[in-house]
Structure formats: structure tokens, C-alpha cells
Image: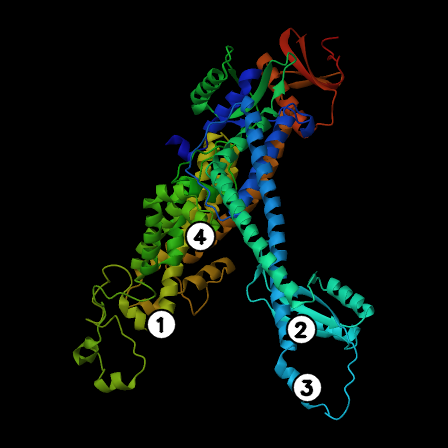
Amino acid sequence: MGELFRSEEMTLAQLFLQSEAAYCCVSELGEIGMVQFRDLNPDVNVFQRKFVNEVRRCEEMDRKLRFVEKEIKKANIPILDTGENPEVPFPRDMIDLEATFEKLENELKEINTNQEALKKNFLELTELKHILRRTQQFFDEMEDPSLLEESSILLDPNEPVRVAPLRLGFVAGVIGRERIPNFERMLWRVCRGNVFLRQADIEDPLEDPTTGDQVHKSVFIIFFQGDQLKNRVKKICEGFRATLYPCPETSQERKEMLAGVNARIDDLQMVLNQTEDHRQRVLQAAAKTIRVWFIKVRKMKAIYHTLNLCNIDVTQKCLIAEVWCPISDLDSIQFALRRGTEKSGSTVPSILNRMQTKQTPPTYNKTNKFTSGFQNIVDAYGIGSYREINPAPYTIITFPFLFAVMFGDLGHGTLMTCAALYLVLRESRLMAQKNDNEIFNMMFGGRYIILLMGVFSMYTGIIYNDCFSKSLNVFGSGWSVRPMFNSRAGGNWTDGTLNSSTVLQLDPAVDGVFNGPYPIGIDPIWSISVNKLSFLNSFKMKMSVILGVIHMLFGVTLSLFNHLYFNKPLNIYLGFIPEIIFMASLFGYLVILIFYKWVSYGARNSRDAPSLLIAFINMFLFNYNDPNNKLFYRGQMAIQSLLVVIALACVPCMLIVKTLVMRRQYLWRKHLGTQNFGGIRVGNGPTEDEAEIIQHDQLAQQSEDEPEVKDLRLNVCHCMVRSGTSKCILLKMGRDSSCGGCQ
């Protein structure tokens, strides 16, 4: 349990991986997830690294899989996800995977292209079928004998009839239903009313072959005379994206053409059904393994990306990597390297070499399914420094409890507890379902947090006696109005008093009115009182102040253990002690006053109790002559004045004195143990091991922070200075440099 209260102890290790075993070793290290690789090639462009081609191939395979996944989702086929974690394929298997994905992508593209062409042809034939049917109806209506008889009655029988040969042309087509009004208006204006338009809606919606959406269209036929009007009509149809189809002039030809269209539609429908069945079979087969393929490809991509962080030696047979890893997991890392070497078939084992460094390691906190949610809350505010105390274990209690102090409802807390308990008890089944709902995943990830919040809310709901915003009368009220009718008890209430008064005040000083404190929580009599909010708000405010001050003092106290662990006495004397004195002098004193008021003032003298808020304000104003707010105790003025002075004195101690002391320590370390000889600093230098550590750290810092400096070398000069063995560390530009003691 030690690692739970403080971040893991980390170490910098150097890995020597054989080229043929590097892939499998990195794969095994990635499975255990206990190492963090450092980039040893910061100056190299990402497109110039050794394994950039493999990364590109993995990205291309990932793109093909995303295309297949999109087609599967479009077909509403469920993707099978068993939660399987497949092993990483070997590099030689990449060719087979690429061939499989290439074949699958080409097959789906070919199917989609053929299907789109077939659907487009099917749409055209369907529209032509509706045109032939509707135009036949239009011509039948125009050739109705009853209409001809009505027109002959209007003519004079004695007048000779001169029939001029009049031949009208027509075009027929299909247009979107929503464009009909504008289309008709444009025809009328452009052709000046010299055309005749008939249109009818197609009842069944048609499928757009490109988008797959359902569209509503209408059939139209336009009659006109002359080629000039014909050209105008065609241009208008083209502008409104109407589709024109050839329509025979005679009824017999239309019927023969309709029969041929129906036969072609039946054949095309059969081909479409077979194509869709084949597409469904291909997608269903892909849906069973696409999740496994995704995992394999992304693992391979991650491995090659990690290998690009490594440095390759001059022999091109070994990869050198630097990793941060927990010291407690070194055995697991060694075992993973052995597994990777055996899996690759290499005879040369991989080497892990611990390195000494002055660099600050990364912070790593081990978590499990219970503590991960609380650790995420802490990390959201900021990740602590290396080896600092981890606040997450304490947050397991403080966070749900402080939420419950604000929430405080027994009924709603019970519902929250039941919902979280369901998620906890069925977590294995729910995890296997792999729900994509973001809100549900957020709730499921915080199931243990919600469970504790619900349990604590039930507790505070009992304390507040609040259940769905209603009070529970379990033990009966501790107050009674009967003694107020008894004159011997000093009361003067009558039945008329109760009937005529809207508000009555019970005096707890009268014997029998107050029968003692309520067994647990708030007395339910407060739910019908006029001053309910005043009492409850005052009670909750005082309790919140007490809990908040305790919480802050606890947090400041935790910093003491950090200062002791890192051996920083300056932070203790000029940081922790002034902070704790400042908080205790002001807010701690306020908590003491709250408890003092609760203990000192009872039912008989509660009206004489001074206000805490006014007393705290007067404490800073040094005002002790307020007639409306008397003192709590004798000697209050001297004690409060002393506390304010102490609190104010702590502020410059933290802000000014600590800064000056730190500056003096910096100057003292800068000049400690050194002497000037010809402008060159020599004296007590580091040992040989420390020189190597400094060289490694500065070169690493140079590669991370200053990649533009190319010729920077760290030269370690070994010299004998004044009969003592010391070494001078010089940082100079160029290859050959030496200090004054070496010349």
C-alpha cells in the first residue's frame, strides 16, 4: 500500500535491443505498460527516421479499415467485439495483412460502383415507367368522347367547319416535387403562356443512387408548338434539373415501351438483390474480425513509432533506448524483455542497464478500477511532482463526503446509490458490451465515485432529516405546546390564542416545551416553522465552515510530509509553519468560537448570544465597543488582537523572508568551494561518476531544449590542482579544449 500514498519511485534505464528482437521486445513492454520511452533523436525529422515507411504502411492499413468500418455502419451491421486482446503480428505478417485489406477494399469499392450504376439505371427505368403511365392517362383524358361532344354542341351546325391541321409537340420528364411551383411559373413567364403543363405526383418515394436518400418527384408533360418554344422548354428543364425521357406519340407504341420497361425493371431488381446479398455477406464477414484487425494494426503502428524514438548504433545491429520505469517493476520488465527475445528467436539477450541521473523523473501513480476515478479527478487539477504525496487516497473519502454535505438528501441519495450499485455489480457484463455512448461511459467510469457519493448523501440526508425535500417524523417531535397552556408553567396561551394567531413562538425555557435533543438529525418540527431557512442555513453554514477549515488544515499538513521527505527545512520553517499559524489564528479560531457558542449558550440564554459573523468582522477592525454584539468571554479583545497581529506577521514571512533566504542560499552555493585562478573556476568538482551523470544529463537537455546547436561538446578535463585530485567540467564550443590546469 506504500505506492498508493506516494508516487512510484522511478529510474532511468538504458535498453540495448538487437535489431531482430527489438520489435518483439517493444511489443512485450507495451503490453505491460510500465515504461516511458524517451526520444533520442530530437534533431531528426519524423520523415527521415528509420521506420517511417513502416509507420506509413500501418497508417494506410488503418485508413482501409476505417473505410470498411464506415461501410459496415452504413449497412447497419453490428460489429462483433468480444474484448479480445490479440497478439501483435510479426513484421513478416504485414504483407499478408496489407494484401487482405487491399482485396477487401477493392472488392467493396467494385461492389459499390456496380451497385450505384445499377441503382441509377433502376431509377431511370422507374421514372420512365411512371412517365409512360401518366402520359397515357393525360392522352386518354384529352381523347374522352364526352369532352368532344361538349365541344361540338357549342358550334353552329349550319356553319361550315374548317379544320386546320394543328400538330403540337410535347416533352415529358421528372422533376423534384418541391420545384414544381417555381418551374411552372418560369414556364409561364418565359413562354408567355404559350405552353400547356400537366403534372402528377409519384406516390412512392424514389431512392437517390448517390446518397441513398429518399426523394419525392413528380411527372410532367409540356405541350408546345414550334421549335423555338421547344428549345426554351428544354433549357428551362435543364436549369431546374429536370430529367427528360423519350415518350412515343402513339398509344400503341407507349404500351409496347411500357411492357419492355417493366420486363427490364424485373431483371434489374433481381440483379440488385443478388448484388446486395453479396455485399452483406462481405460486410458481415468483415464485421466479425474488424475490431481485431484494428487492434493489430494500431499496435504495430505504436511499436514502429516507439522504435523511431530509439538510437541506432554504428553497426546497425543494435537499437539503444532510454526509458523511465518504476523500480518495483524492474523484474517484470526484465521478464518481458526475455519473452520478446525468445519470441523473436534471437540468441543475443536484450540488456537493461540502470543509469544514474540528476533529471527529475516523471510522476507515476499505480491505480486500479476503484482508485482510477479518484486519481483522474486529482490529475485534472494538476499532476504532482515526483515522489510527492498522492492526494487520491484521501480524496476517496473527502470528495464524496463534501459533495454529500452540499447534496444531503436521503431519497435522492438512495436512488443514486442503487444506480451506482447496479453498475458495480454488473460491471463485467457492461464492460463486455462496449457501449459507444459517451455519457454512459463517463457515468460507468465513475461508478465507484457515484456509489460513495450516494452512500454519504444518505448519511447527510439523515442528519438533515431531508428525504425528497420532506422531513421524516420517525421518533416524534421533541417540542410540545401543551405546557404553554399551563399557567403554573408560566404560560398564558388559550384556545383563542391558537385560533387567532398565525405565528407562535415556543419558548424552550418553559419546562416541558423542549423534551430534549432529537435522537438523530433535525427535529421534523422545523419543517413547519417560519424561521426554518434561517435556522437550517445557520446550522449548515457553521458545519460547512468547520468541515472546510479541517479539510484545508489537513491539506496543508500533508505538505509537511513532502518537506520532510525531500529534506527542505526552509519550506518547513518559512512555508509550512507560517501557513498553519495563519490558518489556525484566523479560521481555526473561528471554529473554536463556533463550538464555544454551541456549548456556552443554551435554551435560556440563547437570545443573548452574540453573532459570529459580526464578531469575526470586528476582530479585523479591532472594534470591541459594539453595543449590539457583546463579547463571548473575558479577555477576548487581547486574544483576538494578538491572533490578528500573528496572522499578519506570517504574510511577509512567507512572501519576503523566504525569497530573501532562497536568494542568499543561491549566491552561497554559487561561490561555495571555488576560487578564481585567471578567471577560470577550479576547486571542488564532481567525481568521475558524477561527471558522467552531468555529461549525460546536459547532452540530453541540449538535445531536448537546444537542438539547433550542433557542435556543442562537453569536455571533461582531468587535472591535478594544488596536489589534490579534482576534475574540471568545461562546456565549450569545438572539439579540443582544456582548462588552465591541463595546459
Residue 324 placement (x, y as % from top left): 53, 26
Q: Quadrant of the N terminus?
A: top left
Q: Which residue is mark 4?
A: 587
Q: Nearer the viewer, residue 543 or 286?
A: 286
Going 34% across and 65% down the picture, which residue do you hit?
Answer: 469
> How far is mark 1 from mark 2, CA to CA?
79 Å
Q: Which residue is mark 3?
A: 151
Q: Which residue is mark 2?
A: 198
> How far is mark 4 from mark 2, CA to CA?
88 Å
Secondary structure beneath disc 2? strand
Q: Which residue is mark 1?
A: 531
Secondary structure beneath disc 4? helix
Q: Quadrant of the C terminus?
A: top right
Q: Decide: few, some or many residues near mark 2? Use Cα within 10 Å; few <14, some 14-19, many ≥20.
A: some
> How far is mark 3 from mark 1, CA to CA?
94 Å
> How far is mark 4 from mark 3, CA to CA?
106 Å
Q: Decide: few, some or many residues near mark 1? Use Cα within 10 Å; few <14, some 14-19, many ≥20.
A: few
Nearer the observer, disc 1 or disc 2?
2
Amino acid marked by disc 1: Asn
Nearer the observer, disc 4 or disc 3?
3
Q: Which mark is residue 68?
A: none
Left or right placement of residue 323 versus residue 330 in this view:
right
